[in-house]
Image (cartoon, rainbow, N blue to C red):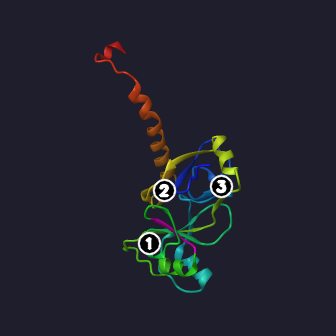
Amino acid sequence: MQSLQGQLLVATTRLIDPNFYRTVVLIIQHDEEGAFGVVLNRPSRKSVSELWEEICDEPCGHAGPVYIGGPVSGPVLALHTDVVSSQDEILPGLFLAADRDQLRRLICDHNEDARHLVRVYVGYSGWGPGQLEKELAEGSWHVASASLDDVFMEGECGGLWETVTRRLGRSVLAPVLDAVPVPDDPSLN
């Protein structure tokens, strides 16, 4: 089994689960025991500061939205670029934090103009042993490489899905189009 950690899952039109309609999921962990990741393009209406006050009863100035990581309830997670507060590195320069003290440092001490990027998630997307592989074989997901730009893309929810889908389409079509011989005289087509 090849691990998909640090890769993106891009929902196809075959995936009928409304929790994943036009979603892009970053895989955080993938091994024989299953897979776990977060939906990157589902912001909630709740701000990070509202969430933090609910769970810690202390003020926080982070005005960004909380993202819905998936349909499975779980701890508050943060994807970020601050190596000091890292628990696990998901891809080069991207880290995961779930520890309360690390989250406090990332969230409460966060400055919108800071050089470190932070995105906060509630819930996650999870698959049991073999479940993700079955969904991939059924054509429910496409796999794409991930970048920091993908993880921290701003804008409308569908923007990331459309961007990554187009990128996948180009990567599939480019080798085919490059292999098609083009005559010197276009009238011979």
65 lies above or below 16: below
First in sequence: mark 1 or mark 3?
3
Residue located at (45% from left, 44% from top):
167
For the C terminus, the image quarter is: top left
Residue 161 appears at what percent x and percent y? 51, 50
Q: Amino acid at mark 3?
A: Asn
Residue pushed farthest bottom?
58
Q: Which residue is mark 2?
A: 156
Q: Which residue is mark 1?
A: 83
Secondary structure at badge 3 equals helix
Mark in the foreground, 1 or 2: 1
Q: Amino acid at mark 2?
A: Glu
Question: On the picture, is 136 further left or further right than 113?
Answer: right
37 lies above or below 101: above
Of 131 and 15, nearer the camera is 131
Residue 137 appears at what percent x and percent y? 65, 41
Instruction: Please say whether residue 96 is one of the residues in the magenta stretch.
Output: yes
Of 173 and 46, nearer the camera is 173
First in sequence: mark 2 or mark 3?
3
Mark in the foreground, 2 or 3: 3
What is the span of residues highlighted in magenta in the rendered image?
Answer: 94-98
Residue located at (60% from left, 63% from top):
69
Q: Which residue is mark 3?
A: 19
| Location of residue 126 by image quarter | bottom right
Residue 79 appears at what percent x and percent y? 51, 67
Of 81 and 157, nearer the camera is 81
Of 45 and 171, nearer the camera is 171
